[in-house]
Amino acid sequence: MKVLVIGPSPEKSKGGMATVIKDIRDDKQLNKQFDIEIYESYIDGNKFERAVYMIIAFLNFKKIYSLYDLFHIHVASYGSAFRKAKYISFLKKRGKKVILHIHGAAFMDFYNNLSDSKKDYIVDILNSCDLVIALSDEWKNKFKKHFKLRNCISLPNGISTADFRCAVTEKGEHTNAFLLLGRIGKRKGAYDLVNAVEMLAPKYPDVKLYIAGDGEIEKINDKIIKKKLQRNIKVVGWVDFAGKIELLKKVATVVLPSYNEGLPMSILEGMAAGKAIISSSVGALPEVVKEENGIIIEPGNVNALVSAMEICMTNPMLISDMSLANLQKIEESFSVQKMHKILAECYIQAG
């Protein structure tokens, strides 16, 4: 079976979708079972560069689609949803098999803000697919309820666990240090974290927060300077894999107080590196982060975020227990091998 995986470039774009696509491309076992190729429908860049690339990509896609049996399309929200809808509509009119893999953390917000006619269009597109993949049981249930889907399954993201073992630290190390991985902005709770550190610093002057990602770097640095927290918070910008490992070695806890999420790769990466987790109760996170491996808070509750960070700083044995629980949990439930085994079954089912 010839499978074309469509989505953002693994090398020329950032984020969880690109990581998932890269892992599919690099999985030897999956590529033994299927003839898989990656089609880059999107790259990062300025608005003009992105627009030109996406138009050319779709025109070129029309020339080569007939070579493939199955199309595995990755989608986020907003513009991504409408762009991928064009691919799906084109393919279904020609009798092709399509799997749609929904990653967008704000997909339901996107849908709820559409006009009635656009809502109908999105529902028709979703139901035309041979299979829709949601990142969690919660999302699957929401999609079934709101879109009347009969073709939806839950498939959590997976991670190459061995790649992160070198970032596991000794018991009791770096309990004062935290890491946020992801696009910098309100949605990921980055500004809530700055406010939390401001509240913690008088009592814990050695508290340390690393923020790694693209996005509103200048804006958050201005906020840090205004609050005189340069000693406590370091914004490192976007980092490659090696840089990510070095940051994970410096902390005991990965924190993600997001307002919207699917199943963020940064949480899985933190778990694979044996870190405790602080996250908000959105998306698939409550299905992943339990009492034994982390702390769940409500999004926007800065006081709860402060309390969770203080617990992590003052309870080294708890952090150690959470570390061990995450190392076990990531292997049992969220390895890329397990994800790709289920994905192979999806290819066979849909194809």
Image (tube, rainbow, N blue to C red):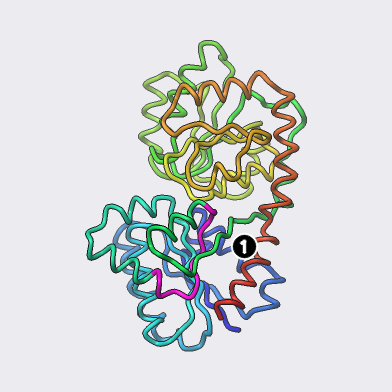
Position in image of residue 242 (x %, y %): 64, 47
Left/right placement of residue 1 relative to residue 129 reads: right
Measuring from the top left, give residue 257's x and y in whole percent.
48, 35
Q: Residue 17 at x, y = what percent? A: 50, 58
Question: How many discs mark residues in the rendered view?
Answer: 1
Q: Amino acid at mark 1?
A: Asp
- In the displayed orientation, state which residue is furthest to the top: 203
Q: Is residue 210 magenta?
A: no
Q: In which quadrant of the rendered view does residue 81 lie?
A: bottom left
Q: Residue at x 71, y 46 (%)?
A: 329
Q: Is residue 89 above or below residue 293?
A: below
Which residue shows up at 70% across the image and 39% down it? 274
Q: Position of residue 24 (x, y in %)?
A: 61, 66
Seen in the picture, residue 94 relative to 225 is either above or below; the reply is: below
Q: Is residue 306 left or right of residue 119?
A: right
Q: Nearer the viewer, residue 292 or 199?
A: 292
Question: Nearest the camera: 195 or 291?
Answer: 291
Residue 135 sits inside the magenta stretch: yes
Locate residue 71 relative to residue 247 in the image: left or right. left
Q: Which residue is mark 1?
A: 23
Q: Quadrant of the C terminus?
A: bottom right
Question: SS of the residue at dot 1?
Answer: helix
Report crowding for label 1: few under 14, some 14 to 19, many 20 or more residues within 10 A (C-alpha). Answer: some
Question: On screen, 78 above or below 176?
Answer: below
Foreground pick, 340 / 185? 340
* Image-quadrant location for residue 300: top left
Q: Which residues are magenta?
A: 126-137
Quadrant (top left/top right/bottom left/bottom right) for the N terminus: bottom right
Q: What residue lies at 74% left-to-right and 30% top-to-bottom?
A: 320
Q: Quadrant of residue 184?
A: top left
Residue at x 40%, y 41% (from the top left corner) = 187
In the image, taking residue 68 as reference, residue 164 lies left or right, namely right
